[in-house]
């Protein structure tokens, strides 16, 4: 159900694909989460992953990370099989929220994104150590977190934690950034600010971004494309092509209406209850 | 002052008293063993507190007690019982952590395991009538009865534990604070958790022989918990944790030497005292900050 033809960029000038799935399917515990999903995310594209609870948004992120195998079809991430390009993929999982007692500084958390997978203990004062520290400071500055990065993460606000976690995902200069509901449980001004930050990162650092979201409205002005998961399938394309009554009705197999409010907000009406809405929402 | 190793009591002359402390081989062995255990407990304890596995660590220390009792019953060296039971306990705890549905279910499962361990310990003790005199040292340690050979064994085991933790330090830290991202980055998070419990079990089994099964906690958890209160910097935190463990061990041994009370009492009380002081100090500091901020806002 690819909507490639609707791409605003002509195929001839299309950049190298960051993510490309063809006829992909994922099964979890004998249940097919989605199937026949074909999509392409181009270099430096900002793509939102939308859909109701249980549609498999986080599952898509985990399939791209190679944490879940594809049951059918093929997938390629940065030109390699999913899970093989670890160093060039940044990942921010669904918020687990650091409790107020977490005595870990934000800067240490960002540093882990850089060297958390390395064995042994680093020697202080070496040039590589200094280079690492400079990179950590640089990426914290990029997300605007310099003022609070040295405070324990548990004492920071949700928006501040989220910025530092984005810095952690960015610190190795990834070519693909996977953000799983980074706007969840942030207040509206913070949602807008983080969305704007992700757009800026996307352009300045030339990173392709896949952002899972519940609500399209805070991000719609910044997006290049949308992947809408529902009813066991997916539609991909520019937001104005995907978020329409016609496309969503076809995807859900039920009449759906997309309303345009006078302030530019979109309201999707009539979406049926997701079949597994009471199950694991991380699926 | 005569040079002979004769116990003279506290002279209040620091040099003489220091000299006295090192005059007896049993004291030298105790100081060496205490130092080795303090360094190891300070390092592994810091990660244990970070990972919120204090209850698991406590259970491992309780498991050391039936281990030692079983070894006595079977006529095996105590160390075999300590290491065998703690290794098995680490396996069981890793299984519980791996299959956990929720934090409360995990703590209930660990609690059940701990109750079973205690029951087994008392069963073995009652089956082996001759052990009654040794029960004290099983629970509260034999700090002052350590032989030179034991010190060498301790050094080897503690050295191995510290080296293992040092090699795995960064992935372990990553897996502890941010498991999802660590897994996506290729850190074997589950294996890491099991490996850490195994090292912790090893550490506890070893520490048990010095401080006894019940007092392991004095060295494993309290200095580490105090260090976590004092700083959020990881390297500084580990250094502080080790320094505090060393300080309470040395001070506890010295105080015990010059008094009639047991070493374990001093080590535990000093650790606890430092923890209380730091917590109260931090709470007061926070209150002062809050008052200052309110005053600033009012102005």
Image: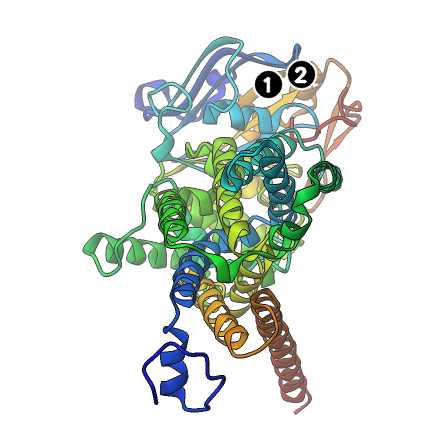
The quadrant in which the C terminus of chain A is found is top right
Q: Secondary structure at mark 1?
A: strand
Q: In the image, is A11 to the left or to the right of A163?
A: left
Where residue A66 sits in the image (x, y, percent)? Answer: 46, 23
Quarter of the view holding residue B108: top right
The quadrant in which the N terminus of chain A is found is top right
Q: Residue at x 52, y 79 (%)?
A: B258
The correct choice, above or below, for B284 with respect to A185 in the image is below
The correct choice, above or below, for B168 with respect to A131 in the image is above
Q: Nearer the viewer, residue B216 or A245?
A: B216
Q: Which residue is mark 2?
A: A251
Q: Secondary structure at mark 2?
A: helix
Q: Nearer the viewer, residue A277 or B189?
A: B189
Q: Earlier in the sequence, mark 1 or mark 2?
A: 1
Where residue B97 sits in the image (x, y, percent)? Answer: 62, 35
Q: Which mark is residue A194?
A: none
Q: In the image, is A3 to the left or to the right of B290?
A: left
Where residue B196 sits in the image (x, y, percent)? Answer: 49, 40
The correct choice, above or below, for A104 with respect to A35 in the image is below
Q: Nearer the viewer, residue B165 or A243?
A: B165
Q: Nearer the viewer, residue B149 or A197?
A: B149
Residue A76 visible in rendering: yes
Where residue B27 sits in the image (x, y, percent)? Answer: 42, 67
Q: Which residue is mark 1?
A: A234
Callouts 1 and 2 close, C-beta under 8 Å: yes
Q: Residue at x 59, y 41 (%)?
A: B68
Q: Residue at x 31, y 24 (%)?
A: A13
Q: In the image, is A125 to the left or to the right of A223?
A: left
The correct choice, above or below, for B222 with respect to B148 in the image is below
Q: How is the image coloured?
A: rainbow
How packed mark 2 is, by other alpha carbons closer than 10 Å (few <14, some 14-19, many 20 or more), is: many
Residue B107 visible in rendering: no
């Amino acid at each position: 159900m690819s909507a490639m033809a609707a791409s605003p960029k002509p195929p001839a000038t299309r950049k190298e694909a960051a993510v490309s799935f063809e006829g992909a399917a994922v099964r979890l515990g004998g249940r097919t989460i989605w199937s026949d999903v074909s999509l392409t995310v181009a270099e430096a594209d900002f793509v939102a992953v939308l859909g109701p609870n249980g549609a498999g948004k986080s599952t898509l992120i985990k399939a791209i990370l190679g944490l879940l195998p594809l049951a059918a079809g093929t997938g390629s991430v940065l030109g390699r099989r999913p899970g093989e390009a670890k160093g060039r993929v940044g990942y921010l999982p669904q918020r687990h929220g650091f409790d107020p007692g977490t005595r870990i500084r934000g800067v240490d958390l960002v540093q882990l994104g850089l060297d958390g997978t390395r064995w042994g203990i680093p020697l202080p004062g070496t040039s590589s150590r200094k280079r690492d520290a400079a990179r950590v400071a640089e990426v914290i500055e990029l997300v605007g977190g310099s003022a609070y990065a040295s405070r324990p993460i548990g004492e920071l606000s949700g928006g501040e934690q989220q910025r530092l976690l984005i810095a952690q995902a960015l610190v190795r200069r990834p070519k693909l950034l996977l953000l799983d509901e980074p706007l969840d449980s942030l207040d509206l001004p913070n949602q807008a600010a983080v969305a704007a930050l992700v757009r800026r990162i996307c352009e300045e650092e030339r990173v392709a971004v896949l952002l899972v979201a519940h609500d399209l409205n805070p991000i719609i002005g910044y997006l290049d494309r949308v992947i809408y998961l529902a009813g066991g399938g997916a539609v991909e394309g520019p937001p104005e092509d995907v978020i329409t009554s016609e496309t969503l009705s076809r995807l859900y197999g039920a009449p759906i209406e997309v309303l345009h409010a006078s302030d530019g907000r979109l309201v999707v009406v009539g979406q049926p209850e997701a079949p597994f809405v009471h199950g694991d929402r991380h699926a | 002052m005569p040079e002979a190793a004769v116990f003279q009591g506290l002279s209040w002359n620091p040099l003489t008293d220091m000299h006295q402390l090192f005059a007896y081989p049993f004291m030298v062995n105790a100081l060496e063993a205490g130092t080795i255990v303090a360094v190891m407990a300070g390092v592994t304890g810091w990660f244990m507190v970070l990972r919120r596995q204090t209850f698991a660590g406590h259970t491992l220390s309780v498991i050391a007690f039936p281990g030692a009792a079983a070894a006595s019953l079977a006529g095996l060296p105590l160390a075999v019982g300590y290491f065998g039971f703690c290794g098995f306990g680490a396996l069981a705890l890793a299984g519980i952590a791996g299959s956990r549905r929720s934090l409360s279910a995990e703590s209930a499962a660990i609690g059940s395991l701990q109750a079973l361990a205690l029951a087994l310990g008392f069963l073995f003790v009652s089956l082996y009538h001759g052990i009654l005199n040794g029960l004290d040292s099983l629970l509260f340690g034999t700090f002052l009865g350590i032989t030179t050979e034991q010190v060498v064994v301790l050094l080897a085991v503690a050295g191995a534990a510290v080296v293992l933790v040092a090699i795995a330090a960064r992935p372990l830290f990553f897996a502890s604070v941010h498991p999802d991202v660590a897994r996506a980055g290729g850190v074997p998070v589950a294996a890491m958790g099991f490996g850490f419990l195994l090292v912790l079990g090893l550490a506890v089994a070893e520490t048990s022989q010095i401080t006894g099964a019940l007092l392991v906690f004095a060295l494993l958890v309290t200095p580490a918990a105090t260090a976590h209160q004092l700083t959020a910097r990881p390297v500084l935190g580990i250094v502080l944790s080790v320094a505090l463990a060393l300080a309470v061990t040395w001070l506890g041994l010295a105080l015990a030497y010059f008094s009639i009370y047991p070493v374990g009492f001093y080590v535990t009380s000093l650790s606890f005292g430092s923890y209380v002081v730091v917590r109260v100090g931090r709470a007061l500091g926070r209150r002062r900050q809050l008052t200052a901020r309110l005053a600033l806002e009012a102005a």
